[in-house]
Image (spheres, rainbow, N blue to C red):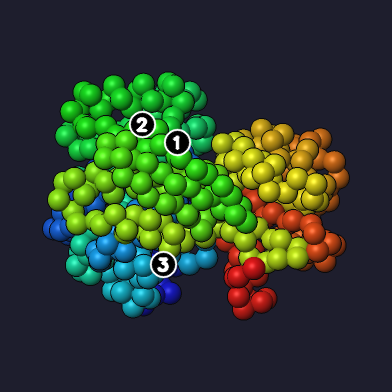
Amino acid sequence: MNYDSSVRYLLSLGRELAAPIQATTAKFDLENITILDERLGRPDRAYPSAHIAGTNGKGSTAAFLESILRRAGFRTGLYTSPHLERINERIRIAGEEISDAAFAEIFTRIHHLIEELLAAGKLRAHPTYFECLTAMAFEAFARARVDFAVFEVGLGGRLDSTNVIIPAVTLITPIDFDHENFLGHSIREIAGEKAGILKPGVPVVVSPERTEARELILRRAAELGCPVVETETAFRVEHQSSEDGCERALVTEFASFRQFGVAPRLAGRFQLQNALTAAAAARVLAAHGFRIPDEAVSEGIAAAEWSGRLEKVHSQPDVYLDGAHNPAAARELAAFWSQNFAGRKIRLVYGALREKAVDEIAGLLFPRAAEVVFTEPRTTRAISAAQLAEITAHHAQRFAIVPDAEEAFERVLAEAAPRDAIFVTGSLYLVGQIRRFWKNRTGVLAP
């Protein structure tokens, strides 16, 4: 298959949530990915890896850790989801997206193996979209002979197809409510799914967590004999400031009393914590023989990039793209406004997916915005702009309904004064769509 036919075939399998939805009538486990991985020759065993689960911050943390490792001289692999504009974003080698040619070549091989396994009766069902992409990442990194790979969990952890790897270190970022229909309706249940990535004896780095999540993770780690590093007790932040929405800090490591600077270019106070979680993982790896100089930690954090999360793409007016798709992310976005936009008019372009807690998110964000323009991302999972307004408009001071996302964005941009701030949020699908539109419109993505 060529690249276009490979992508079309993958999309025909359904997107991220297709697997658990199908599971209600079929199955949802690690059988498919295990069989496919074994038929490939277990390429995920060809390199050491890190495995990251959590509700929010896992993508940013993965980007920080990969950047640290690359700065330390490692040839890296990075597997994340979802993508914003192109599916190739999910599989990166040495900081670059997988090429169209390599993508097509690897998918073609995996497609042939799947057909062979189905014909032999070794697979009971065709692997899902995400299972295929995960197998492709395993194989791509092995072919590229990466020195280290970083894998972000797609959904949950215990039954996520990335969970066949045996990592050198595991990371758990903050756990909160999201995907409750699949992961459970309590923090304890959700934490149980996330903690499902812990492996016997493998060190785990734990971000600051709610009490019930922390207790469950620590208990599970003790059962499996996993050494635990909690970032709250591993580091002390000595001096912290903010510059253009980005946090700056001098940090002391308790174990060695070493100090290092942390200056992520990613906006938002929460990114400091994500950076420290990645730094703690780097320290764990260094203690286990991986050569990661101290300067690689600070330099890697400063160089890390992660699109679509408080990403500033224009000034006067300021325009930010942020995939705040659950209440925890909405709280961080509201905090970012309080810290950086007091007294300024905020205009919100908002679209969401059907399974999201939109009324709770709206209650956190809409009262702070001068205007909310309801729109809808180009996906079958989107709530219509009209229905979204019906559900949540009572939270807004002023609102409009513009179903076409590009038209909604253009309208807000045309009406905004230079000191206003525009935020496109609610769905990563919407963020990716407007990001692509803005790049095509201006040719750049720099403020």
Query: Which mark is first along the chain, 2 or 3?
Result: 3
Q: Locate residue 55, reporting x and y percent.
A: 46, 39
Q: Quadrant of the C terminus?
A: bottom right
Q: Nearer the viewer, residue 260 or 181?
A: 260
- Residue at (52%, 44%) from the top-left corner? 240
2 or 1: mark nearer the eye: 2
State the mark number for residue 8: none
Say which element carries label 3: helix
Q: Is residue 125 above or below residue 11?
A: above
Q: Which residue is mark 1?
A: 174
Image coords of residue 60 (percent x, y):
45, 51
Task: Please indicate, yes or no, whether residue 183 appears anywhere in the rendered image.
Answer: no
Instruction: Indicate left or right for 352 with 54 as reference.
Output: right
Q: CA distance from mark 3 to mark 1?
A: 27 Å
Three-letter amino acid code at disc 3? Asn
- Dot 2: what SS? helix
Compute the Cα span from label 2 to label 1: 15 Å
Mark 2 or 1, nearer chain start: 1
Q: Which residue is mark 3?
A: 88
Residue 51 picture location, percent across and down: 30, 46
10 Å crowding of disc 3: few (<14), some (14-19), many (20+) = some
Mark 1 residue element: loop
- Answer above or below: position of 154 versus 89: above
Q: Determine which of the numbered discs, if any, sits on residue 233 in the image.
A: 2
Q: Residues within 10 Å of mark 1 (few under 14, many from 20)?
A: many
At label 2, the amino acid type is Thr
